[in-house]
Amino acid sequence: MFTAHHSLKDITLTDEDTEAFRNAMSGAKPLKADDRVPTDKPKPKPRAKFRRADESAVLAESLDDDIDTVEQHSGGALRFNRQHVGRRTMRKLARGGYSVQAEIDLHGMTLAEAKPRLRDFIQYSAGQDHLCVRVVHGKGLGSGERGPVLKSAVNSWLRRWDNVIAFVSTRQVDGGTGAIYVLLQRD
């Protein structure tokens, strides 16, 4: 039997093969000259025109963005700022450019436990003239189908509190989308 890795020169036809071919072709009629495919031009070799360009674009994009940017665009990132907070400030915050002066970890707490602790932490930190704090809320992986319950609640609470002027999900090394940097209005 003919396989892809053999050339036609390597194949030896038996009388049986020749007879089978003739029988198979017995009812075949030659094409009229007008119906034939012109053979004067060699057929171009098939190739995926955009495959290389697509692969190059994906590679370039993946090299341009660091893991923090990729994660923030994946939909799990939190971001908020009051109207008077500028883009430069938000960019600096997102890059971890402010010194984190205090941190609270709310992992594993219920909403009823987390809200007063977070409120007290924010008020205390603002009273201590802290500019930037980190809040670890987790990614909600233990919440199952409900999604990130604590993360959503923290997002909502912080937007309502006057001491909070901006927040953004942290860099990967500081918790990624499981934590946020919070900028505070000093008292």
Image (tube, rainbow, N blue to C red):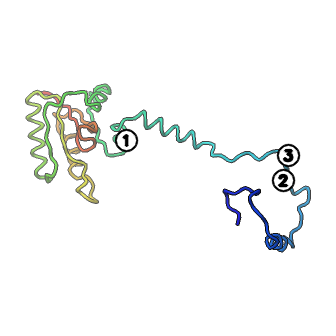
Q: Earlier in the sequence, mark 3 or mark 1?
A: 3
Q: Position of residue 83 (x, y in %)?
A: 28, 30
Residue placed under numbered mark 2 in the picture:
37
Report the mark closest to the observer, 2 or 1. 2
Select label 2 or label 3 by which is in front.
Answer: 3
Q: Is residue 3 above or below residue 91?
A: below
Q: Position of residue 57 (x, y in %)?
A: 51, 37
Quarter of the picture holding the N terminus? bottom right
Residue beneath label 1, please? Answer: 73
Residue 181 is left or right of residue 12, and the answer is left
Q: Amino acid at mark 1?
A: His
Most distant residue in the right direction: 33
- Which quadrant of the figure has residue 185? top left
Which sits earlier in the primary sequence, circle 2 or circle 1? 2
In the shown orientation, is residue 154 left or right of residue 59? Answer: left
Relative side of 135 to 171, left or right: left
Residue 158 on image: x %, y %:
19, 40
Instruction: Check whether the beta carbons of the residues at disc 2 and disc 1 lie within 8 A of each other.
Output: no
Q: Of residues 78 and 185, which is closer to you in this image?
A: 78
* Image quadrant assignment for residue 169: top left
Mark 3 → mark 1, Cα distance in angstroms: 53 Å
82 w.r.t. 17: above or below: above
Q: Is the residue 37 above or below the residue 170 in the image?
A: below
Q: What residue does disc 3 label?
A: 40
Tag in front: 3 or 1? 3
- How far apart marks 2 and 3 lie (CA) works out to 9 Å
Quarter of the rendering occupied by the C terminus: top left
Above-or-below relation of 110 to 178: below
Q: Nearer the viewer, residue 42 or 143?
A: 42
**Residue at coordinates 82% horizontally, 71% vertically from top-left?**
15
Residue type for callout 3: Asp
Q: Secondary structure at mark 3?
A: loop
